[in-house]
Image (cartoon, rainbow, N blue to C red):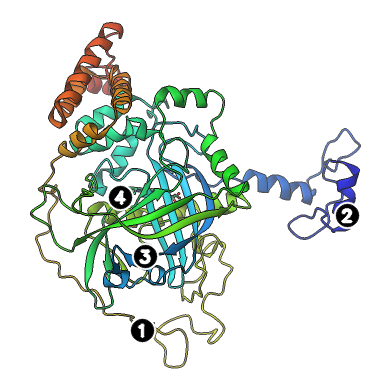
Amino acid sequence: MSDKSKKTNDETNETLTNRQGHPVTNNQSLRTVGNRGPSTLENYDFLEKISHFDRERIPERVVHARGAGAHGYFVPTGKAGDEPISKYTRAKVFQEEGKKTPVFVRFSSVIHGGTSPETLRDPRGFAVKFYTEDGNWDLVGNNLKIFFIRDAMKFPDLIHAFKPDPVTNIQDGRRIFDFCSSSPETFHMVTFVFSPWGIPANYRMMQGSGVNTYKWVNEEGKAVLVKYHWEPKQGIKNLTQQEANEIQATNFNHATQDLYEAIERGDYPEWDLNVQIMSDDDHPELDFDPLDDTKIWPKDEFPWLHVGTMVLNKNPEDYFTEVEQAAFGTGVLVDGLDFSDDKMLQGRTFSYSDTQRHRVGANYLQLPINAPKKRTATNQTGGQMQYEVGRGSQSPHINYEPSTVGGLKEANQTGKEYTPMVEGKLVRETIDRQNNTKQAGETFREFEDWEKDDLISNLVAALAPADKRIQEKMIALAEEADEEYGRRLKEGLAAASEHTESSKPLGGTDNPEDAVRKGHEAD
Ligand code: HEM
């Protein structure tokens, strides 16, 4: 650092202290007996500095570890199509045309670790925290409109299959397709992820979607089913595998860099928020279940209604404080927004706050990035790193409810309560209208030629080392989806097998009995 800047620091009193507020007068050398050591253990400044460093990391997110974030605001249109939005929802965030609500957004990739390349084939996360006047609302979405599975019970298996092999620590297409070929509901998502839609060019030029089905509730307590979609005003751009390889050769932070630099130069990215609405029932007339997140709601039957626009105009001041510690969850809804019976959504809603209590800590909601911008008042108390006295100063002795003499009271219900009727046998079953491949075929036919070419080439490359039985199951799914899709995948794999050694079985053996015997020998 130059003398000039040192002078400036002195002038502004920006000198170093430790965390106790003591001035640090020597930040270069340990306190030692003579200048060659040994060192002494009462070096408080050193102990504090190194011990804090030793604890700089928290567990990374179990999925979506690699991400970038930005602040901004959301402005509603006050309408849904030609109708006032109040017809469908009483959520205040949507009512008043032009009224700004602050937001924080985190984009991410899913499978690999916190510093993995941003060129990898993966869905991208698109999580938005709205700091509304009624408290926080999180819309935790992805870039793609659908997901691999429709039952939360399968999520850990899905993720295990996509994460690196537990032995080699290498991601392995044989494991991915072993799981996917035996879970045919994944086929629509596989079709997207192995096409250029699996590598968005950057975060600014990708769509976002809530994926799961939610509900909106109006003032009369009437509900509709709703899906959310973000559309980038910058346009959409995806990469072929070849283009991604070229970027990755020189830059594995390109998406974070693109977002950060755009905001720094004042080129603020914007997304329109659109919704699709369905009446709140089972819709037996459809060939898919409206609660099935492996399906797209066709736009011609359920048009996109523009309900607002989001602008990102401020970079985080500190990555760890804001982006790493940000905690989004599907349970974080405000009045006028509600859950649907979507089984994925319900499983997700447990998982997010559960993992955040472990990843960030029991008091993660006190951190400024996660705390609502409105007053909070709760009798929840204690826990690691508690620093807020959350219940206000009116009745400091009363941290329980009900009380005759003081303390916090229950809030009044605003609007008519939504009380859906639920009835049925408790079962463990898959849904009826599965229709696993029809929309995958439609998606394939909508792809442009270069997207189809890239999809086939990526699938062939990833499937070529897989067990023949797995290849055959994947070909059968593609054939069921679309004749051309199936034929091209089959031809591609046949051509690849001429150049590939015979596929190596996972686990080192084809014969399950061998595996059992090996296990016994090890005993
Ligand atoms: C992150 C669970 C499905 C989007 C996470 C995290 C967990 C999780 C545990 C880490 C959260 C954290 O550490 O803060 C699940 C489960 C699912 C599921 C159990 C299914 C049952 C989905 C789906 C989507 C999605 C369908 C897309 C709509 C995201 C996003 C993040 C995330 C965007 C990153 C949020 C952030 O930026 O902090 N998920 N997830 N997840 N999930 Fe899911």
Looking at the image, residue 164 lies above or below residue 400:
above
Nearer the observer, disc 4 or disc 2? 4
Q: Residue at x 46, y 46 (%)?
A: 107
Report which residue position mark 2 lands on: 10
Q: Secondary structure at mark 1?
A: loop
Report which residue position mark 1 lands on: 412
Q: Secondary structure at mark 2?
A: helix
How many other residues sit within 10 Å of disc 4, few (<14), some (14-19) or many (≥20)?
Answer: many
Q: Earlier in the sequence, mark 3 or mark 4?
A: 4
Q: Residue at x 27, y 40 (%)?
A: 148
In the displayed structure image, the side of residue 393 where residue 198 appears, left or right? left
The answer for how far apart the CA atoms under marks 4 and 2 are is 53 Å
Q: Earlier in the sequence, mark 4 or mark 1?
A: 4
Q: Earlier in the sequence, mark 1 or mark 2?
A: 2
In the displayed structure image, the side of residue 40 where residue 481 appears, left or right? left
Label 3 close to label 4 by CB (< 8 Å):
no
Q: Earlier in the sequence, mark 3 or mark 1?
A: 3
Task: Report the amino acid beneath label 2.
Answer: Asp
Q: Where in the figure is residue 132, as x and y percent of width and height?
A: 45, 68
Q: Quadrant of residue 419?
A: bottom left
Report which residue position mark 3 lands on: 333
The answer for how far apart the CA atoms under marks 3 and 2 are is 48 Å
In the displayed structure image, the side of residue 370 where residue 476 appears, left or right? left
Q: Earlier in the sequence, mark 3 or mark 2?
A: 2
Report which residue position mark 4 lands on: 211
Nearer the observer, disc 4 or disc 1? 4
Label 3 close to label 2 by CB (< 8 Å):
no
The answer for how far apart the CA atoms under marks 4 and 1 are is 32 Å
